[in-house]
């Protein structure tokens, strides 16, 4: 199950205090950040990428990872973060190095070879 958006009661508590003047804006923002809503992205800022962990709630499917240009260790970290939030993962157009890193680090990971990557596969 995805972490998703905070429930209405949590939002009412955080925002109600700000609206009534009894709560501090910084405290409410800190509370929202702790729920996974971070400035600049909805989800997780991982330093070298922003991962949208709430896409599944909005669209019905988690963020799909486009493999080209990403170091293999970043792909692994993205998949690990998605797993922490109970999300399935899909990485497209992976290199041999990315494939090997994912299969070695993610229990239960499945590699599905397609005709396109079969023709380009050099390792």
Image: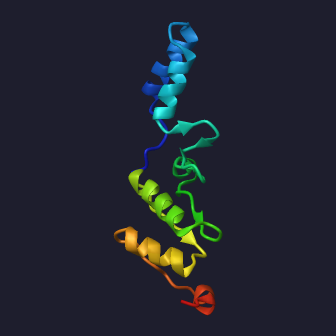
Q: Which colour scheme is used?
A: rainbow
Q: Residue 50: percent from the left, percent from the top?
A: 60, 50
Q: Which residue is drawn at 61% across and 43% down?
A: 41
Q: Nearer the viewer, residue 16 or 118?
A: 118
Q: Which of 4 and 122 is in front in this view?
A: 122
In the image, residue 94 sits, relative to residue 86, either above or below, namely below
Left or right placement of residue 54 versus residue 119 in this view: left
In the image, residue 111 sits, relative to residue 61, either above or below, namely below
Residue at the top extreme, as displayed: 21
Q: Which residue is drawn at 55% across and 7% down?
A: 21
Q: Residue 81: percent from the left, percent from the top?
A: 45, 54
Q: Which residue is drawn at 41% across and 57% down?
A: 83
Q: Residue at x 43, y 49 (%)?
A: 2
In the image, residue 109 sits, relative to residue 80, either above or below, namely below
Q: Give the total of numbered labels.
A: 0
Q: Residue 85: percent from the left, percent from the top?
A: 42, 50
Q: Nearer the viewer, residue 56 or 112?
A: 112
Q: Residue 1: percent from the left, percent from the top?
A: 39, 51
Left or right placement of residue 34 versus residue 107 in this view: right
């Amino acid at each position: 199950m995805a972490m998703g958006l905070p429930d209405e009661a949590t939002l009412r508590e955080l925002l109600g205090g700000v609206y009534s003047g009894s709560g501090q804006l910084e405290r409410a923002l800190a509370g929202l950040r702790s729920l996974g809503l971070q400035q600049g992205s909805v989800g997780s800022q991982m330093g070298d990428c922003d991962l949208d962990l709430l896409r599944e709630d909005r669209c019905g499917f988690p963020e799909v990872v486009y493999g080209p240009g990403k170091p293999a260790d970043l792909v692994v970290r993205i998949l690990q973060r998605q797993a922490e939030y109970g999300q399935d993962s899909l990485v497209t157009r992976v290199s041999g190095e990315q494939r090997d890193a994912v299969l070695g680090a993610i229990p239960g990971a499945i590699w599905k070879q397609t005709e396109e990557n079969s023709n380009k596969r050099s390792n």
